[in-house]
Amino acid sequence: MRKAAVTALAAVLVLSGCSAAEQTATSAPAESTAAVQNEVTSANGYGQGETGDLIHTSFFDWTVNDAWQTDEYEGITPAAEHSLLVVNMTLTDTRTEESVPMYDSDFQVQWGGSEDTDFAVPVTYESSIEGGETMFAAQYTLEPGAPVTNNLVFEVPSGYTDFSMLFQEYFSDESLGDLFCVKFSAVYR
């Protein structure tokens, strides 16, 4: 089922390109943390934000807090002419009674033009690399109301600094829900 979801999202990535589609973004309420810039919900099946925005999905809220590129992360090194993109995220299960099973492939990054190869899933997908204290595992669970902050690590071609993080709602009946995109820049640190 994970491969079907990855394939479906890959097709959506190429078609959407995280373009200027209609979205809903409002200023964060005063009681929110200073890091939240806007709150984003979907409009007509699509929601788009940027670093620091709180993205509301049917299952959880998520925020891209920060992103950077590096040549090594926790002993992981990229292939030649590639870098590692580290995306720090916070996810919170907003449902009151059910936990949310999560997979590393729930989030993908996109860069460049409209090539169907201009996207990546985390390095933990189909590899022996395991998550840990500083990286989301290949499979994990969000508990109701408990925010989790960690990193997703992607291998991307060198030379790109502008990226989009995508999440496509995928329901148990295998139907697709809304698509969410967060645009961000990531430079070397």
Image: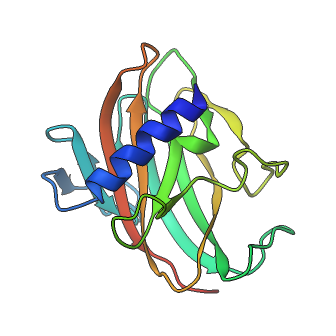
x%, y% of residue 27? 20, 58
**Is 30 displayed left or right of 127 in the figure?**
left
Kindly tell me whether residue 53 is visible in this rendering: no
Quadrant of the rendered image containing residue 2: top right
Residue 182, above or below 47: below
Tally the numbered discs.
0
**Is 60 displayed left or right of 1 in the figure?**
left
x%, y% of residue 116? 42, 58
Q: Is 131 or 89 nearer to us in this picture?
A: 131
Colour scheme employed for the rendering of this structure:
rainbow
x%, y% of residue 170? 42, 28
**Is 2 displayed left or right of 9 in the figure?**
right
Residue 38, above or below 146: below
Residue pictured at 35% horizontal, 28% vertical? 176
x%, y% of residue 97? 51, 14
Residue pictured at 58% horizontal, 53% vertical? 121
Residue 109, above or below 167: below
Residue 15, above or below 35: above
Residue pictured at 38% horizontal, 45% vertical? 11
Quadrant into which the C terminus falls: bottom right
